[in-house]
Amino acid sequence: MTAEVQEKKDKEKRPSVPSEAPNEVPVEPPKKASAHSRAPADPRVSLLKKFHGKFLPKGVLRDRFKVLMARWNSADGDHGGVTVAELQSVLDDWKRARGLT
C-alpha cells in the first residue's frame, strides 16, 4: 500500500498541463511526402485529355484518332503501346487543321 500512496503523491506533484504555454495550442510539424506517394502522372493522359469534348472532322484525322483510341482501350496494361509521340502528332495535326498554330 505504501507504493500506491507514493504514486498518488507523485501524481499530485506533477502538473497536468505544461507550465510553459498553458494557453497555446500545440503546433504539429508539417507532414513530409512519404516514400510511397503517388507515381508521376502519365504524360500520355495529359495529351489525351486535350481531345475530350473537341470536334474532330471526318477524314484522316478522325480515323487516326479512332485507331489510337481503339489501341488505348485495349485490354493491355500499357494502353496498347500508344506513345506520347503518336498522340502529340495527332494533336499537332488537329491544331494545324484548325489554324491554331
Image: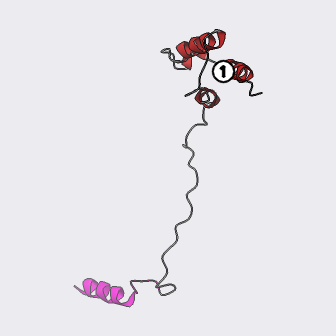
* Viewport quadrant of the N terminus: bottom left
The quarter holding residue 91 reads: top right
In percent of width and height, residue 82 lies at: 62, 17
In percent of width and height, residue 76 lies at: 51, 16
Q: Secondary structure at mark 1?
A: helix
Reply yes or no: does residue 5 show up in magenta: yes
Identify the residue at image location x=77%, y=27%: 101
Q: Main secondary structure of the magenta part?
A: helix
Q: What residue span does the magenta drawing correspond to?
A: 1-18
How dense is the environment of label 1, judged by Cα within 10 Å: few (below 14), some, or many (20 and up)?
many
* Residue type indicated by callout 1: Leu
* Most foreground residue, 4 or 74: 74
Reply yes or no: does residue 8 show up in magenta: yes
The quarter holding residue 7 reads: bottom left
The quarter holding residue 6 reads: bottom left
Q: Is residue 77 above or below residue 21?
A: above
Mark 1 = which residue? Answer: 87
Q: In the displayed image of the protein, which residue is found farthest to the left?
A: 1
Is 92 displayed left or right of 34 in the figure? right
Q: Is residue 96 above or below residue 59?
A: below
Identify the residue at image location x=55%, y=40%: 38
In percent of width and height, residue 59 lies at: 63, 9
In percent of width and height, residue 36 lies at: 54, 43
Q: Is residue 52 above or below residue 68?
A: below
Identify the residue at image location x=64%, y=28%: 47
